[in-house]
Amino acid sequence: MAHVLLVEDNEMNRDMLSRRLIKAGHTVSMAFDGSQGVAMARAGGHDIILMDMSLPVIDGWEATRQIRGSEGLATIPIIALTAHAMAGDRDKAMAAGCSDYDTKPVEIVRLLDKMAALLDGAR
């Protein structure tokens, strides 16, 4: 199983996602804003990052760009999570450096499948 960095500012979303990820056998670390997410990603130890795009301090787009620009983090899988499922959002997330994209509310089975595919590809 993977060590997941969950970057999410909404307490309900953090609680729901972290409980489901832990139930699926993952270890979860949590960041509450984009700046904290970048710092935790740079500190290392995570196998995959779940990045909310609407974050305080630094939004998820910029946080992803900063993580991608950090030494040793260019290939860590990052899945964008957003409630803003508008045309072009997937392309915008991929252009920022995300490996995949998922919409909120999160369907946990779909998210776990995406995580597994990315983690298998990273090994």
Image (cartoon, rainbow, N blue to C red):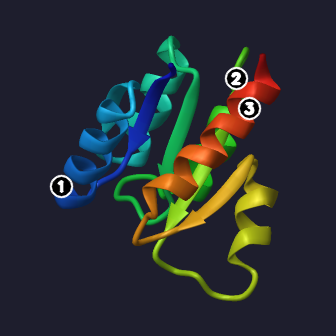
Q: At x 51% / y 21%, what residue is drawn?
A: 2
Q: Amino acid at mark 3?
A: Gly
Between residues 47 and 43, which one lies in front from this camera angle?
A: 47
Q: At x 64% / y 38%, what residue is drawn?
A: 66
Q: Residues within 10 Å of mark 2 (few under 14, many from 20)?
A: some
Image mark for residue 121: none
Q: CA distance from mark 3 to mark 1?
A: 28 Å
Q: Residues within 10 Å of mark 1 (few under 14, many from 20)?
A: few
Image mark for residue 69: 3
Mark in the foreground, 3 or 2: 2
Between residues 15 and 68, which one lies in front from this camera angle?
A: 15
Label 1 belongs to which residue?
A: 11
Mark in the foreground, 3 or 1: 1
Up the image or down, 43 lies above or below 97; here it is: above
> Of the residues under marks 2 and 1, which one precedes in the sequence?
1
Label 2 belongs to which residue?
A: 73
Per the image, label 1 sits on a secondary structure element best described as: helix
Q: At x 51% / y 25%, what residue is drawn?
A: 41
CB under 8 Å between discs 2 and 1: no
Residue 75 seen in render: no
Is 83 placed left or right of 11 in the picture?
right
Up the image or down, 60 lies above or below 84; here it is: above
Position of residue 16 measured from the top left corner of the image (x, y, whole percent)? 24, 52
Per the image, label 3 sits on a secondary structure element best described as: loop
Q: Amino acid at mark 2?
A: Leu
Q: Residue 68, located in which quarter of the rendered image?
A: top right
Per the image, label 2 sits on a secondary structure element best described as: loop
CB under 8 Å between discs 3 and 1: no
